[in-house]
Image (cartoon, helix red, strand yellow):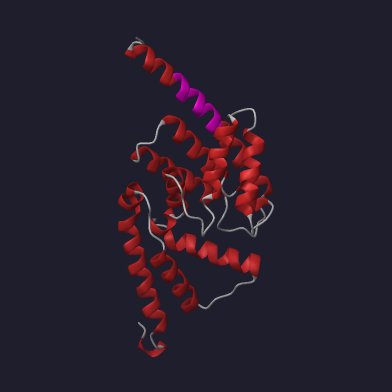
Amino acid sequence: MESQAGTAYISNQMQATDNDLIEEVEAYVVDTLRRQLPAKIKYHNLVHTKKVVQKTRLMAEHSGVNQEEKTLLIIAAWFHDIGFIKTEEGHEEVSAEMAEDFLTGKLSKAQIESVKKIILATRIDEKPNSLLEEIIKDGDMAHLGGKDYFERSNALRQEWKNCDNRVYTDEEWFKINEDFMLNQQYRTVAGQEIFNAQKEKNLASLRKKMADSNEPQAFRK
């Protein structure tokens, strides 16, 4: 029977190898986004990617996934929006293809397919089919429950204007955001525990902004 010390050694070696690959992925994605992401992309940029990686890692640690699953999740989080260097529409498919190209020879075919499925789960209307896909979906929407929500919302507003010439009044923008927040629910227990409280605060602040924007100018302080 393998000793506990031997099992721990193997586990530590596997984790070290996984960490090396994650660092390699991070270096590639960071360099690619810095060099190739169009300046008009104000939201789906390196700031967003790093936040999704951070929150995905946090939820993975709170969700009891194993080391291999955690590694695949973090890799998928790094790659999930890299496709914006080529296109806004269908960027998830491009991201999955770029991940496959980079990971070939570094992971098994089955592991690469898992990474691609996790990436594709970030499509806005995609229903997650596994815990890993639920985690990445929650990570991608973590900004709704973040203290920098309004900063990130403004970045998205600017990106839509830059890319699609979509221009909204404040009232229209606040309503779009309110509807989106009400329709979005965190799927994992970890996501609910980590983000829901701040999301409710953000929603309350958003509604105050909506009320203030609808108040006649003469009555505003």
Instruction: Indicate whether 66 appears above or below 193.
Output: above
Percent coordinates x, y for residue 59 in the rendering:
38, 43
Q: Which residue is drawn at the image coordinates 32% and 57% (left, top)? A: 196
Which quarter of the image is occupied by the C terminus?
Answer: bottom left
In screen coordinates, is 25 left or right of 171? right
Position of 145 relative to 154 (above/below): above
Residue 50 image offset from top left, x and y in percent: 50, 45
Q: In this view, does 126 lie above or below 117?
A: below
157 is higher (above) or lower (below) than 108:
below
Q: What stretch is highlighted in magenta?
A: 13-23
Q: Does the magenta stretch include residue 102?
A: no
Q: Does the magenta stretch include residue 15?
A: yes
Name which residue lies at 63% across and 46% down.
Answer: 34
Give residue 105's position: percent from left, percent from top: 64, 28
The total number of labels drawn is 0
Q: Could you say which is closer to the camera, residue 76 or residue 154?
A: 76
| Type of secondary structure dominating the magenta stretch | helix
Q: In which quarter of the image is residue 165?
A: bottom right
Quarter of the image that includes the N terminus: top left
Quarter occupied by residue 15: top left
Horizontal and vertical percent position of residue 103: 62, 33
Give the residue drawn at x 67%, y 37%.
101
In the foreground, 194 or 205? 194
